[in-house]
Image (spheres, rainbow, N blue to C red):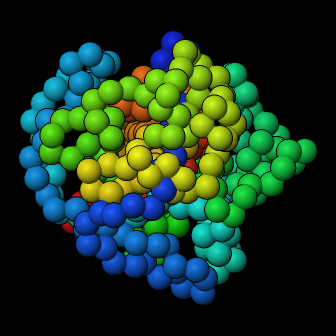
Amino acid sequence: MAPFWSATRRAAALWIAVAAGSGSGWAAEPGGRDLGPLVDIAGGSFLAGDPEGEADEAPQQAEAGSFRLMRLEVTTGQFADFVAASGHVTDPERSGSGYVWDGRWRLERGADWRFPEGPGAPPAAPDHPVVQVSARDATAFCAFHGLRLPSDLEWEYAARGTDGRRFPWGDEAPGPADRDLANFGSLRCCAPDAGDGYLRRAPVGSYPRGRSPFGILDMAGNVWEWTASTRPGRPGRVILRGGGWGNNPYCLRTSYRHDNPPHIGLSMVGFRCAAGPG
């Protein structure tokens, strides 16, 4: 089973630091640290898709309801608190392996959320986005806090707003002089690149210039994010959004999506939680 997108279309991701946004509330983590602000996103109409994108990105008018979304991706430290409080065991821990990207995807024995590249590699940093968690693990984390994963439509609306922008910051893809917009890979497909300051994951909120119209950070790059939606025509596959640290700019677009089975973990996939009507 080959995880992720085709080898011709990999994009990289940008990191974004905390920036001003809509009004927000805070989600408290039982027995641990809080989850940071959830931004209030007023519902609205927007043009989804991209005329220059994939077949499933055909432009269409869409309507999003009001909801709330975490300003930042869930960190390894927050996930550690959840595990300590709940006793949760992730799918990669149960299976004994997770997928690791090093120019290609390979199944690495012992890779999990504590050691995303495997037991012989450095441990995950507490302020980096948690990875090597499945869609089911992400759902369990959100439910523990009375939250949920955002839908595919909600995610795109939060990333692009009402003006149809191709990237969270606007219509222009990042070039050599724009490495402060996000944490992503090489400009040509497809390899990790440290030109933005980080070869792999970066601390959440490190790239404020790349924020979305609602002030949401890391909607492009750093790590892909699980959603609550399944891929039409691909039963049992859950949609991922946002691109990651090993991708080129094509996959950072607000309309681009990929999918994976809900039970696997990968070193370039994390999540954030939502609240309110789905």
What residue is rendered at 69% in x and 77% in y? 84
Does residue 115 show up?
yes
Could you tell me residue 248's position as x and y percent? 51, 24
Q: Can you say which quadrant of the picture contains the N terminus?
A: top right
> Residue 118: x and y, percent?
82, 44
- What residue is shown at x 52% (from left), y 79% (from top)? 34
The quadrant holding residue 52 is top left
In the displayed orientation, state which residue is furthest to the front.
Answer: 177
Is residue 29 found left or right of 98 in the rendered image? left
Q: Nearer the viewer, residue 114 or 139?
A: 114
**At 33% across and 57% down in the image, what residue appears?**
215
State the residue in front, 8 or 237.
8
**Residue 211 relative to residue 112: left or right:** left
Residue 121 location (% of width, % of height)? 86, 45
In the displayed image of the protein, which residue is found farthest to the bottom? 31
User: Where residue 233 sits: x, y (%)?
Assistant: 32, 27
Tell me if 163 is positioned left or right of 30 in this view. left
For the point 16% across and 52% down, the residue is: 64
Q: Quadrant of the C terminus?
A: bottom left
The relative height of residue 216 versus residue 146 in the rendered view (above or below) is above
Q: Is residue 91 above or below residue 70?
A: above
